[in-house]
Image (cartoon, rainbow, N blue to C red):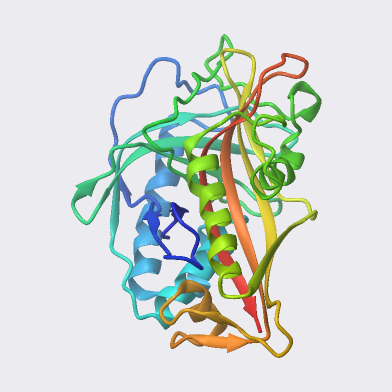
Amino acid sequence: MPRRARSAHAYVAALCVLSAACGTATERPLTPAMSHAGVLSQAKALAVVQAYDRENNRVNGSLDISGIAGIETDPLRASSVAWMTVSKRLRTPIPAIRSTEPKFAIPKETANGQWFLTICQRVKGGVPSPQPSYVVYAKPVGTGTFRAAYSLTPTEYEKIPDLAYDSSGAALATSSPRDLAVAPADLGRAITDHYVKHLSGKDALAFSKPLDEQLGAGYNLGVSALAKRDVVLKREVDSSPSPWFALRAKNGGALVFSTARVTDTLKSRKPGGRASLRAGSNDAALLGKPEGATAPRFTIRRLEMFMSFVPPANSGGKVKVLAFSETATSVRA
């Protein structure tokens, strides 16, 4: 399913960077560090990716929303359902994707259950992505199959930390938030506060292009642009828990996949005034009005997925957001 990292907010220009889910995986020799000591072997992990890719392309090609639940789990599933709903209403086809050079980081079973990370190169429409995509596959409780849970592609500007492995070759998972400078469950609020409350240089987050120049700048540009139209944009974080996954890095920190669920409220500051959603925008399409809409108030729930480096607790280091995606999942007038 398509994923987009916003370089400007949808309320302003809807300029987005597409990062679609993996397509057909091509087997390639893996590095010695990636061994068979985790929850499944490399061969079985590759089979999981190949099965997902085949079904993903079928689901995307037929815009089969009901089929998403068979190959993805939350938070990715919720994002994909929303994206496909938008694609159907805007009559936008989803091209087939091919993934190549898959590599795996497979931990032993953790408190988060069985899961593993795939790092693959993507080819979309015949054009290879310059950056690898990081896809987490997890086995939900009560199911017998691994399903994609996160899919993120970092920019070329951010260095990804080297992952740590034990003597048997299994990736080292981090399941205790006490080991980290910021608990994964708290990352969503910390990230949102960083750009909404203008806390750069004052909080636990380091500067990064995805956070400060894309997500944060886009949001604040949207706030300013709407204010000129006498519309107030307010963003709040939902505190409900979301699944997270973390792999230990060689430097003692962790590569963390986490989620923030936020609610945007658009409301005219003038009595009797109205806010609007642009024709052809994803938000308008999700509302069921691709031709555009106006109302006194709009409430938009968004799902944000992050891949971040989180330093060890008490290290004095700062969290760095390496990649993100943002998807509107519901719109109400």
Q: Residue 43 placed where, x, y %?
A: 41, 33
Residue at (58%, 19%) from the top-left corner?
249
The quadrant of the rendering that contains the C terminus is bottom right
Q: Is residue 199 above or below residue 95?
A: above
Q: Residue 160 placed where, x, y %?
A: 47, 26
Residue at (43%, 88%) from the top-left corner?
291
Q: Is residue 295 above or below residue 182?
A: below
Q: Residue furthest left?
A: 126
Q: Residue furthest top?
A: 167
Q: Residue 8 placed where, x, y %?
A: 46, 56
Q: Nearer the viewer, residue 42 or 212?
A: 212
Taking 155 as reference, is 333 left or right?
right
Q: Nearer the viewer, residue 5 or 162?
A: 5
Tell me, yes or no, if residue 136 can be seen here. Answer: yes
Choose top left, top right, bottom left or bottom right for residue 317: top right
Q: Residue 112 placed where, x, y %?
A: 71, 39
Choose top left, top right, bottom left or bottom right for residue 255: top right
Q: Is residue 192 above or below residue 283?
A: above
Tell me, yes or no, if residue 147 can be seen here. Answer: no
Taking 287 as reference, is 127 left or right?
left
Q: Nearer the viewer, residue 34 or 232?
A: 232
Choose top left, top right, bottom left or bottom right for residue 122: top left
Residue at (60%, 68%) from the top-left corner?
227
